Amino acid sequence: IDPTLDLFEEIEKLKKEKNAVILAHYYQDPDIQDIADYIGDSLGLSQQAAKTDANIIVFAGVHFMAETAKILSPDKKVLLPDVKAGCSLSDSCPPHLFRKFKEKYPDHLVITYVNCTAELKALSDIVCTSSNAVQIVESLPKDQKIIFGPDRNLGAYVMKKTGRDMVLWNGACMVHEIFSQEKITKLKERHPNAKFIAHPECEDAILKMADYIGSTTGLLNYTIKDSATEFIVATETGIIHQMEKENPGKTFIPAPPNNSCACNDCPHMKRNTLEKLYLCLKNELPEVDVPREIIEKARLPIERMLDISA
Ligand code: 13P
Ligand code: SF4
């Protein structure tokens, strides 16, 4: 790339020329968030992908998010700036093993968290995100038997909130499992007026300490509405960019990980850069495609989720 190029300007130009839309998750680099047409949590991003009239969707997020956009808008070209932007949680649930797991519970309904492959969604009855998982479980009859996967922490949180029993797949996100209960306790002591907010992908011991638990959009909205001026944030650090933008004068402290070599950045989300975004829009590559038969099977469980959350 010519180092004299103003990438913001070039991306804007290409976007207009090609009728493209940039959808970005809150965990993306600040530069990417700033150039995006829409920034959101997984639910908001799926809703946008379903209704956009752009010809090209540039998905600044990870692979399963781009796949979901393709399933909802199969006739559009979906681009992902770095095709290797995966997800440890999605990887923790290989479809061939999940199929066997599912066979053990033939009378159970399958709810899958959106952080999974398109193939896994095709094996599901309803998809959910962190912002609607409780609502989706509550929309089902009380005696409905449920398998929930792949995130065991979100699953356990939903069980607690709804009082229902579910069979959980044993998967987790590498970013949300690194927080240290001990270090957070000490940090809270040093910042007694700070609110501690956490994503439901965190372990129960961390969630028990939280003043508020929610999806990335939920966490952001909480920081806007709450009168506290300091927040300790237990999720990926990208969201802090929007929290700071929306709340001038408030302070946001990333929750400390349990060892000093670890950090709260998602290595998958952070594979995307402004340079890669520019190149992918220019070259219309890498493109994310999903086989037709998977699209047909995965579409209904996602649409059920969108209907329940509308
Ligand atoms: P939400 O933005 O839907 O809360 O999801 C968080 C996440 O881990 C996405 O990878
Ligand atoms: Fe996956 Fe966790 Fe990264 Fe989200 S933060 S993309 S769940 S590894």
Image (tube, grey):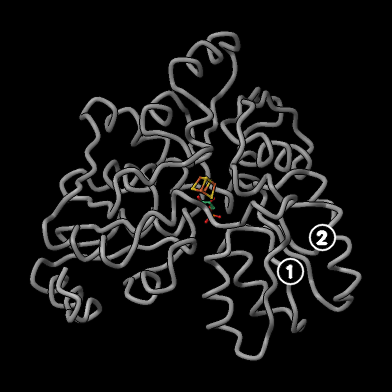
Q: Is residue 201 above or below residue 11?
A: above
Which is more toward the observer, 163 or 81? 81
Residue 62 x %, y %:
39, 49
Quadrant of the image occupied by residue 235:
bottom right
| Residue 40 falls left or right of residue 137 | left
Which is more toward the observer, 192 or 23? 192
Q: Secondary structure at mark 1?
A: strand
Could you tell me the amino acid type at mark 1? Ile
In the displayed orientation, state which residue is furthest to the left. Answer: 17
Residue 205 x %, y %:
82, 46
| Residue 176 falls left or right of residue 271 | right
Residue 162 x %, y %:
75, 41
Could you tell me the amino acid type at mark 2? Ile
Q: Residue at horizontal 65%, vertical 22%?
A: 145
Q: Secondary structure at mark 2?
A: helix
Residue, disc 2: 184
In the displayed orientation, state which residue is furthest to the bottom. Answer: 249
- Disc 2 vs disc 1: Cβ atoms closer than 8 Å? yes
Disc with the residue nearer the chain's start (2 vs 1): 2
Residue, disc 1: 232
Q: Residue at horizontal 76%, vertical 45%?
A: 161
Please indicate, yes or no, whether residue 121 appears anywhere in the rendered image.
Answer: yes
Residue 62 circle label: none
